[in-house]
Image: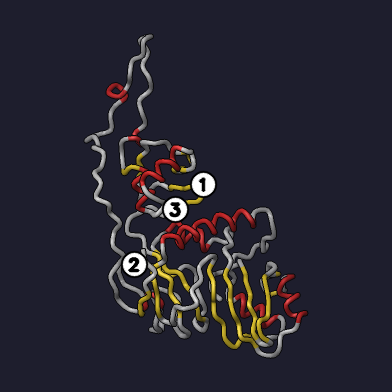
């Protein structure tokens, strides 16, 4: 994957990462216990090796294609017990189905299916953050290539600008939008009136909204009418409602960060593919944020849509 920027519209999908190395031969069928059992010197037979050692792709090849490292690095990770498949520690020789099995490194799930795409878009104002709009307004999916098909991760209000991730990685999409993970999003808001220290203290402590108290936010004011606000919830239009609650309605709102993802040079309406390092960093952030938030404040029965 590259960090090349693109204007909105059709484009070529990311090329596949193939190194041309030959596969191990795969038996035409899974061996039966009688075929795989070995007899020791006592005459007893060992249990058959599981089918997972014979079916699918080599785990180290899948890890290398996903950008974890070279095949040798992947083998070292497996040998060190740092790779899990479907929640169990993997061993060398393990094969997987990249489309079905859940592969994790150090507890962090990674996307292994082929053809995964991760587009970072700078959404302009007036564009709807959905795949389709019944009112016929322009949508974010019209600003990125049609193949492979990607969908927005969460939503930004039609009048909100800034960074939006679109992907076809269903596992990562779920983790980024589920309330239990709480990945941070940072916003820069131009507001009405001049912000005072007491306003920032309210935001940091949490403010009362019609659907309950918000979690404490990170808040600072780089200029008298500018607010930098970091939240990890996903309530409907939460940032705008928080600003209204402290008496400073939003004039303009821009999302500047999604977890570890930042790009201040991406023009409005343009997109680029995430680099492999960015994808790995995002996957790690999901796991780390869930660990940080575990056992701490939770917004009652509020789940909320991702739409600010």
Q: Could you tell me residue 34's position as x and y percent?
A: 29, 21
Residue farthest left in this picture = 28
Q: Among all residues in the image, which is located at the extreme bottom?
A: 193
Instruction: Tell me: residue 281, above or below residue 229.
Output: above
Q: What whole-number distance in Å separates the C-alpha atoms at marks 3 and 1?
A: 10 Å
* Mark 1 neighbour density, 10 Å: few (under 14) some (14–19) many (20 or more): few
The label nearer to you, 1 versus 2, is 1
The alpha-carbon separation of the residues under discs 2 and 3 comes to: 19 Å
The residue to which callout 1 is attached is: 106
Which circle marks residue 149 in the picture? 2
Residue 198: name its quadrant.
bottom right
Quick one: label 2 or label 3, which is nearer the N terminus?
3
Which comes before the other along the chain, label 1 or label 2? Answer: 1
> Could you say whether the residue bearing mark 1 is in a helix, strand or loop?
loop
**Where is 275 relative to 228, above or below?**
above
The kind of secondary structure element at disc 3 is strand
Mark seen at residue 258: none
One can see residue 280 in this view: yes
The local crowd at label 2, few if under 14, some if 14 to 19, many if 20 or more residues have their Cα within 10 Å, is some
């Amino acid at each position: 994957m590259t960090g090349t920027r693109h204007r909105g519209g059709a484009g070529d999908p990311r090329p596949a990462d193939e190194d041309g190395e030959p596969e191990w031969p795969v038996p035409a069928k899974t061996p039966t216990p009688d075929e795989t059992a070995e007899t020791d010197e006592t005459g007893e037979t060992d249990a058959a090796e599981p089918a997972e050692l014979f079916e699918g792709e080599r785990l180290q090849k899948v890890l290398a294609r996903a950008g974890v490292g070279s095949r040798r690095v992947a083998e070292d990770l497996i040998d060190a017990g740092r790779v899990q498949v479907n929640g169990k520690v993997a061993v060398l020789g393990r094969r997987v189905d990249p489309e079905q099995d859940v592969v994790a490194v150090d507890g962090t799930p990674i996307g292994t299916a082929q053809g995964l795409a991760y587009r970072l878009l700078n959404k302009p104002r007036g564009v709807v953050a959905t795949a389709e709009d019944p009112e016929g307004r322009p949508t974010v999916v019209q600003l990125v290539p049609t193949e492979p098909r990607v969908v927005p991760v969460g939503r930004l209000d039609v009048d909100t600008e800034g960074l939006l991730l679109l992907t076809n990685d269903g596992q990562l999409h779920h983790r980024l939008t589920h309330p239990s993970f709480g990945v941070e999003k940072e916003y820069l808001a131009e507001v009405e009136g001049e912000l005072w220290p007491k306003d920032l203290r309210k935001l940091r402590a949490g403010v009362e909204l019609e659907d309950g108290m918000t979690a404490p936010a990170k808040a600072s004011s780089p200029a008298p009418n500018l607010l930098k606000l970091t939240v990890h919830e996903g309530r409907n239009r939460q940032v705008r409602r928080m600003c209204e609650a402290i008496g400073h309605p939003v004039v303009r709102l821009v999302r500047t960060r999604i977890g570890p993802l930042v790009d201040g040079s991406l023009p409005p309406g343009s997109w680029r593919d995430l680099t492999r390092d960015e994808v790995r960093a995002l996957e790690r952030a999901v796991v780390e944020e869930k660990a940080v938030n575990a056992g701490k404040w939770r917004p009652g029965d509020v789940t909320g849509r991702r739409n600010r």
